Amino acid sequence: MDNKPLNSEHDLLLLVSQGDEAAFARLFHTYHQRLGAFVYQLTGSLSMAEEIVQEVFIRIWEKRDKLSQVSHFHPYLYTTAKNYTFSFLKKLGRELEHKQQWEMTIAADTGNPYEESMDARYRRIIDQAIAELPAQRQRVYLLSRDEGLRQAEIAERMDISRETVKKHMVLALRAIRSYALTHPETNLLLLLFLPK
């Protein structure tokens, strides 16, 4: 791309759609900080926001041939980022489900004192992580885990929307996972039982 000014964002998108790497770099530098702030609001994690922003722009580059058809890039970019972020957080939620299944398996096997002590330590760490959650998020998680309530039931009991319940649940799972990863005694267990 030469250095002459572009008449519009559409011109920039057209160049990117044609494989112009300099135009793509310009697009990235124009949006990455604002997009990072947006994703950070959804995740609460700076490192996660950085990772997601990078992945979103990689996907835009991989599908750059469609950019010539995009008339309003800002909403296109933010919708792409929001969808990817929610998929990313759902994956973290599935990872915690695997851990909970592992907890039940260990709890059912009482023949080995080592496994019992590992289970007790693991549960203590998870309980500590839950105790550090914000009050409303903690309540959402405990209503799900301890009372087995579905999202709709939690929403009704707490008088909040299902989307709010869902967001609290996903963020609670992420926070618990992050807390557990800071404890060496759980790291091996996470490596063994989380999906690759």
Image (spheres, rainbow, N blue to C red):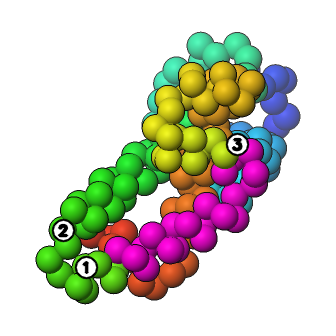
- The answer to whether one can see residue 157 in this image is yes
Q: Nearer the viewer, mark 3 or mark 1?
A: 1
Crowding near pointer 1: few (<14 within 10 Å), some, many (20+)?
some
Name the one closer to the observer, 46 or 35: 46
Q: Residue at x 49, y 46 (%)?
A: 145
Mark closer to the chain start, 3 or 2: 3
Q: Quick check: marks 3 and 1 in contact, CB under 8 Å?
A: no
Indicate whether residue 149 is drawn in magenta.
no
What's under tag 1, amino acid-wise? Glu
Mark closer to the chain start, 1 or 2: 2
Q: Secondary structure at mark 3?
A: helix
The picture quadrant where one finds residue 129 is bottom right
Point out the stretch of residues depicted in magenta: 119-138
Mark linked to residue 109: 2
- Residue farthest to the left, as pictured: 111
What's under tag 3, amino acid-wise? Leu
74 versus 51 height, above or below: above
60 versus 184 height, above or below: above
Q: Which residue is mark 3?
A: 42
Residue 167 pos. (x, y %): 64, 37
What's under tag 2, amino acid-wise? Asp
Residue 186 pos. (x, y %): 41, 77
Q: Nearer the viewer, mark 3 or mark 2?
A: 2
Mark linked to residue 115: 1
Distance between mark 3 and mark 2 Cα atoms: 39 Å
